[in-house]
Image: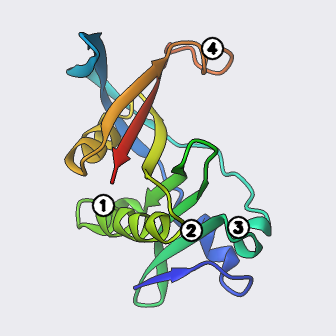
């Protein structure tokens, strides 16, 4: 079941932020106005977890922002955080599913909820950013009709020793 985040279930937002296996990266290529990519699988995978970001009241009070939480047996196991962006797309700021619940279609259901919300808010599509080393996420977005719209090689310069690149994914309606 997917529920919109409210003040009463706000604490559940933090329950699905878990580590994930970094098993490789995508290698984007831009040629003749089209993005493609190949994959590189790492010989030594490693675990990664994103820092927990606080969620402010605006995601419950501002009509141009929303968080949806996915529940199984009254336990929050997934989330998607989005907002209207200046370019007409709904920006997915975060999406996550608890580790033991991955590969069961929950992320896709959360994306479809984002599509529904974006269309209600007259957006032209969805957009998001992830790192090139988040191979499983990149595969997930490609399977869900997202295409690469750009790559930023400098965004993570301060934070990453692995020279991660930001990959911007788009899904137009």
The residue beneath circle 4 is 157
Residue 15's disc number: 2
Mark 2 falls on what kind of element? Answer: helix
Name the N-terminal-most of marks 1 and 3. 3
Callout 4 crowding tier (Cα within 10 Å): few <14, some 14–19, many ≥20: few
Please state if 163 lies on the left or on the right of 138 as rendered: right
Separation of marks 4 and 2 at Cα, in angstroms: 29 Å
Q: Residue most toward the top?
A: 31
Badge nearest the viewer, 3 or 4 = 3
The residue beneath circle 3 is 59
Residue 122 is situated, as x and y percent measured from the top left of the image, at 50, 63
Relative vertical location of residue 75 with respect to residue 116 in this rendering, above or below: below
Separation of marks 1 and 4 at Cα, in angstroms: 30 Å
The residue beneath circle 1 is 102
Callout 2 crowding tier (Cα within 10 Å): few <14, some 14–19, many ≥20: some
Name the N-terminal-most of marks 4 and 2. 2
Please state if 41 lies on the left or on the right of 101 as rendered: left
Separation of marks 1 and 3 at Cα, in angstroms: 25 Å
């Amino acid at each position: 079941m997917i529920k919109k985040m409210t003040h009463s279930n706000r604490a559940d937002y933090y329950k699905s932020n878990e580590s994930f296996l970094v098993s490789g990266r995508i290698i984007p290529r831009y040629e003749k106005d089209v993005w493609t990519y190949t994959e590189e699988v790492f010989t030594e995978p490693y675990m990664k977890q994103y820092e927990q970001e606080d969620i402010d009241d605006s995601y419950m009070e501002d009509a141009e922002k929303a968080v949806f939480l996915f529940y199984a047996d009254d336990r929050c196991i997934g989330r998607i955080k989005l907002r209207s962006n200046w370019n007409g797309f709904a920006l997915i700021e975060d999406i996550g599913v608890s580790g033991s619940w991955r590969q069961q279609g929950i992320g896709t259901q959360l994306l479809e909820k984002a599509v529904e919300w974006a269309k209600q808010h007259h957006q032209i599509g969805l957009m998001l950013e992830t790192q090139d080393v988040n191979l499983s996420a990149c595969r997930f977005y490609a399977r869900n009709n997202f295409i690469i719209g750009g790559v930023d090689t400098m965004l993570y310069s301060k934070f990453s020793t692995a020279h991660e690149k930001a990959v911007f994914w788009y899904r137009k309606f």
